[in-house]
Amino acid sequence: MTAIKLRGATKNFGSTVVLRSIDLDIAAGKFTVLLGPSGCGKSTLLRLIAGLEDLSAGSIKIDDKEVDDLGPKERGAAMVFQNYALYPHKTVFENIAFPLRMEGISNTEIDLRVRETAKQLHIEELLQRYPRDLSGGQRQRVAMGRAIIRKPKFFLFDEPLSNLDAELRVALRLEIARLQRKLAATMIFVTHDQVEAMTLADTLVVMHGGVIQQIGSPLALYRAPVNRFVAGFIGSPAMNFFTVIAHQVVDGRTLINLNGGVSLRLPFLLVDQPATLGIRPEHVEFDPDSADNLIYADPSAFEILGIEHFGDRSFAHIELALGEITFVTPTEHSISPKEQLRLRLPPESLHVFGRDGHSLAPVPGRSLPPPS
């Protein structure tokens, strides 16, 4: 198993800074996912690790050995791309076998390893077909097989599922996770899809603007985002945000005012202003029993923007004087534009972000500070 360390890793393309002094430890035998929007630098970071791009500054170590001057082959990585990169004139067998033929491995050994690899990926019956005869999911399995058969030090995946339909993405996602566990391999996976990231990662690295925003387990980042960008990027549907227009301290707690005359109490002190309040749709309580931190809206005071049904639950998108808010309702309960809307924002589920976008307040799972 291979560990990778980046220190001050910087990449410039001319005057454009793509990566800004990246410090990152990638644990041996773990699944690390680089997550972020297009243009955030995640694929460039992967290419630096692979040796396909040169550092502008900083260093990369693989198993405590500096590899800045080593080419891709000497670094021992196997890479799986978005576009499969299969040889159209070669069969599946020959595509998977190609790296071994380049190394001069015997035909007997090649045959054994190709069939063993194909069995791992459930493509044994496809070995004599050509890429043109395969579905997108089957082609990606072949590309994975060509990477696995080399027995590399570590694996690099550059958005390998983005060209597949939703059903195939789920199937291949499970297949990649199963393979990682079976091989106990170090894998680095680039994606802009936070569902892929949350379901695959042991360690999640969120990037934006060429900078690492936060590193941790998927649940840690979901529960305790360090800034508004991470809070809004992780979670589906996205977190609700509301602007705090005024606040005051009453009995050791903060009373805040939001648009539309909404007032809420926070179980902590808020000393920075202006601020933004955040809460995830699944934490908004619909038609609650509790009477604190409530939002009321008469039928004339809200508009139903849309209802998304997902079987056991639905997501309602509503426009209020407060702003747009998304929340979860039971599927069997239909929101009526003729009824009063009653929502609660539980104080223990609220996030507060300061003027610089960084988290100001305790979040679920953290102890609250005593009133001063």
Image (cartoon, rainbow, N blue to C red):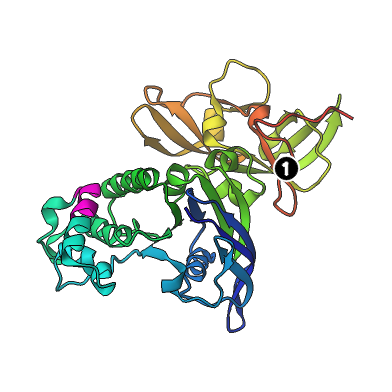
Residue at the bottom extreme?
Answer: 14
Q: Is residue 135 visible?
A: no
Around disc 1, counting alpha carbons within 10 Å, would you say few (fewer than 14), some (14 to 19), or many (20 or more)?
many
Up-down: is 10 above or below 275? below
Q: Nearer the viewer, residue 129 or 368?
A: 129
Res. 84 image quadrant: bottom left
Residue 178 seen: yes
Q: Which residues are magenta?
A: 115-122
Residue 281 in the image: x percent, y percent?
Answer: 53, 35
Describe the element under mark 1 as helix, strand or loop.
Answer: strand
Residue at the farthest top position: 289
Q: Quick check: is 118 in the magenta stretch? A: yes
For the residue pair 281 and 34, the one nearer the viewer reads as 34
In the image: residue 284, left or right of residue 248? left
Residue 98 on image: x %, y %: 23, 69
Residue 353: image location, x then y, percent:
71, 45
Question: Label 1 amino acid?
Answer: Val
Q: Is residue 159 above or below residue 252?
A: below
Q: Which residue is mark 1?
A: 244
